[in-house]
């Protein structure tokens, strides 16, 4: 799995960080998503899929 994020469209809701904190973080100044691991190990894939589904702005894209 490879992950990309459209940070310029992020609304800063933070659902990704709450769901997959080893993969996503937020900038302190504005809450915009920061991708920590663009190719996480298999044991994190379920959490990443959930984070993508929960993202209200739909900025997380998953690639096989």
Image: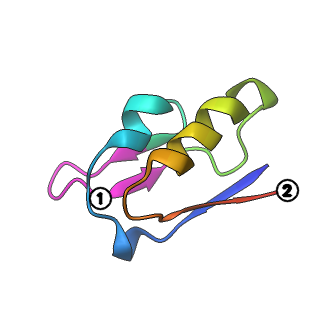
- Residue lying furthest right in this view? 64
Does label 1 or label 2 sit earlier along the sequence?
1
Q: Which residue corresponds to the image point at 14% horizontal and 56% vertical from the top-left?
A: 29
Q: Residue at x 40, y 68 (%)?
A: 7
Percent position (x, y) of residue 40?
Answer: 70, 39
Residue 11, x across and y down, in percent: 27, 63
Which one is nearer the viewer's eye here, 64 or 40?
64
Residue found at the far bottom of this picture: 8
Q: Tell me which residue sits at (26%, 55%) in the image.
A: 12
Q: Nearer the viewer, residue 53 or 20?
A: 53
- Write down the region rendered in magenta: 25-35
Could you tell me residue 43's position as x and y percent?
75, 23
Name the residue tied to disc 1: 32
Q: Is residue 32 above or below residue 52?
A: below
Residue 64's label in the rendered image is 2
In this view of the protein, which residue sits in the foreground, 30 or 12?
12
Q: Which quadrant is the C terminus positioned in?
A: bottom right
SS for dot 2? loop
Badge nearest the viewer, 1 or 2? 2
10 Å crowding of disc 1: few (<14), some (14-19), many (20+): some
Looking at this view, name the residue that lies furthest to the top: 43
């Amino acid at each position: 799995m490879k992950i990309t994020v459209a940070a310029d469209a992020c609304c800063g809701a933070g659902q990704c960080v709450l769901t997959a904190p080893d993969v996503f973080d937020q900038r302190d100044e504005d809450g915009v998503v920061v991708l920590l691991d663009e190719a996480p190990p298999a044991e994190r894939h379920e959490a990443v899929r959930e984070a993508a589904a929960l993202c209200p702005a739909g900025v997380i894209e998953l690639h096989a």
